[in-house]
Image: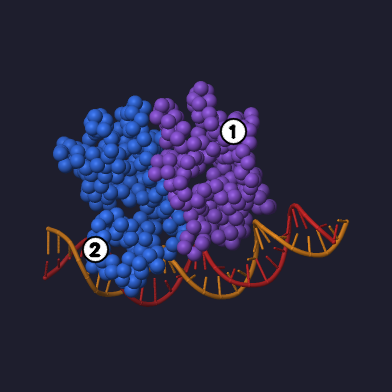
Chain colours: A blue, B purple, C red, D orange
DNA sequence: CGTTGAATTGATTTAAGTCAATCGACGTGG
DNA sequence: CCACGTCGATTGACTTAAATCAATTCAACG
């Protein structure tokens, strides 16, 4: 477990089109990738824990990672879920090098590790790179706040409907048939629901033109969903 | 309303010790303040709305501002509350110059306005300034995620107890008597509660060594609060 | 084919929202 | 100076959304 791998061509491709590096000039990308290590973990491996000293951030090459906090009673609450091309763990670089959340692989994942020391240097020397990092933080911040508002304004079926519509839109093409990117239990956590509540929300949505078979989703009537 | 004021000495002092400028070198502070306009608004004035084009961010000189989103039914959910020395509205600078939330003065406020165009230029030229902005985003991100976790893990009385303990700690000195910085209805919104729920939470906390008289709070037994 | 973990379904409990009435403080104007 | 009106806070009764607990069912995989 956690064995380092050689960075192959496919890895490099994904990194180049990741949130971190997409749009940056070739020479800068090359500099940013200097010293980066690719490795993979098994499902459920913990990548870092709240309170630990942070020394690097990560870009996901494959799989999904969840960010969460643990309550006194041991219950866990997810605050974000990240997928291929996304960056996580960068926040602590600006907050005294301590992680404030836990991160766990939700399934087998492949990650690229970027050292804070190098990245700080690069940010200092290359405004474009600094801007890329800052833009990621802005997106994460916007997501997190949207999450707060979503939790407080919408019921479980509404949150699920919104999520499905987002997925639909993200998929780009007007295809109203797609596959959930990860397990329902993880989705439930992301939406702040117990798995049972997600299940019930899905079965309620069936009456609004949504078909569900395992992870496959088909949306018959997007308008009806928006009205939920 | 919204009348521009001359930036006085006191304003400058607050700005210098704000999250934006604290720790920056004098010349840089001077540059950052070039072109900044100070103005004040009445309670409940809306500073910007979701979807509007964003052209500047703000530093609060006095008063409190809430950031919120509005649901279909018109209900409002707060995602953050900012006070003196804090920065808000900077997020859109990295997200296509559109606000994604609404901002409203919770009371009469005085603000300093910083234009995106100038600030972007300054970030490009001064890594220290870019870092200051990024650090703010990191803190906001951390706060927002902590909020999500807090909402999902804790009950109303627990959230209120946590908030009181934070205030207590923020106050620095071991003084266990202090004043709520703003109205209870605003606090309720910040904590994601209906005002009635906050009220009930307070009355429950009275049985755990908390005295409340108007906005004045006295904590008899911090340990008991932590155990809630 | 059987085992394991995920997902669903049902019954029940619980936290918090809603609605409505009352109380209190404060400021205005008679 | 007192009466009134406004607004925020509190309290109580009720409703509702979602968590919890428990029992199956389902699906994937060896």
Nearer to the camera, B95 or A86: B95
Q: Residue at x 37, y 52 (%)?
A: A78
Residue A11 image position (x, y, % from top left): 19, 41
The lab-note entry on whether marks 2 and 1 share a chain reads: no
Residue B202 image position (x, y, % from top left): 60, 56
Q: Is residue B147 left or right of residue D1?
A: left
Nearer to the camera, A224 or A12: A224
* Badge 1 density bin: few <14, some 14–19, many ≥20, Cα 10 Å: some
Determine whether B29 is above or below A160 in the image.
above
Observer able to see residue B131: no
Residue A117 image position (x, y, % from top left): 33, 29
Instruction: Classify mark 1: helix, strand or loop.
Output: helix
Determine whether A80 is above or below A198 in the image.
above
Q: Quadrant of residue A77 in the image?
A: bottom left
Nearer to the camera, C11 or B28: B28
Outermost residue, top side: B27
The chain letter under disc 1 is B
Q: Is residue B46 left or right of residue B151?
A: right
Q: Residue at x 26, y 33 (%)?
A: A25
User: Which residue is labeled 2 in the image?
Assistant: A177
Q: Residue at x 38, y 65 (%)?
A: A226
Separation of disc 2 and disc 1 at Cα? 55 Å
Instruction: Classify mark 2: helix, strand or loop.
Output: strand
Q: Residue at x 45, y 35 (%)?
A: B117
| Callout in the foreground (2, 1) | 2
User: Which residue is labeled 1 in the image?
Assistant: B14
Observer able to see residue A143: yes
The chain letter under disc 2 is A
* Badge 2 density bin: few <14, some 14–19, many ≥20, Cα 10 Å: some
Residue A137 image position (x, y, % from top left): 38, 41
């Amino acid at each position: 477990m956690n064995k380092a791998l050689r960075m192959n061509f496919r890895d490099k491709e994904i990194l180049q089109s990741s949130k971190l590096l997409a749009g940056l000039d070739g020479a800068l990308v090359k500099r940013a990738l200097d010293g980066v290590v690719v490795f993979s973990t098994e499902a459920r491996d913990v990548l870092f824990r709240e309170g630990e000293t942070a020394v690097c951030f990560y870009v996901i090459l494959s799989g999904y990672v969840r960010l969460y906090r643990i309550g006194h009673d041991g219950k866990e609450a997810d605050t974000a879920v990240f997928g291929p091309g996304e960056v996580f763990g960068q926040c602590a670089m600006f907050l005294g090098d301590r992680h404030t959340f836990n991160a766990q692989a939700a399934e087998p994942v492949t990650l690229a590790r970027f050292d804070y020391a190098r990245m700080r240097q690069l940010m200092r020397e290359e405004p474009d790179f600094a801007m890329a990092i800052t833009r990621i933080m802005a997106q994460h911040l916007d997501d997190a706040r949207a999450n707060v508002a979503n939790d407080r304004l919408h019921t479980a079926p509404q949150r699920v409907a919104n999520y499905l519509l987002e997925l639909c839109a993200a998929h780009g093409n007007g295809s109203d048939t797609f596959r959930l990117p990860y397990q329902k239990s993880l989705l439930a956590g992301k939406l702040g629901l117990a798995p049972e509540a997600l299940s019930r929300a899905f079965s309620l949505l069936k009456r609004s033109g949504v078909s569900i078979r395992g992870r496959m989703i088909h949306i018959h009537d997007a308008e009806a969903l928006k009205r939920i």
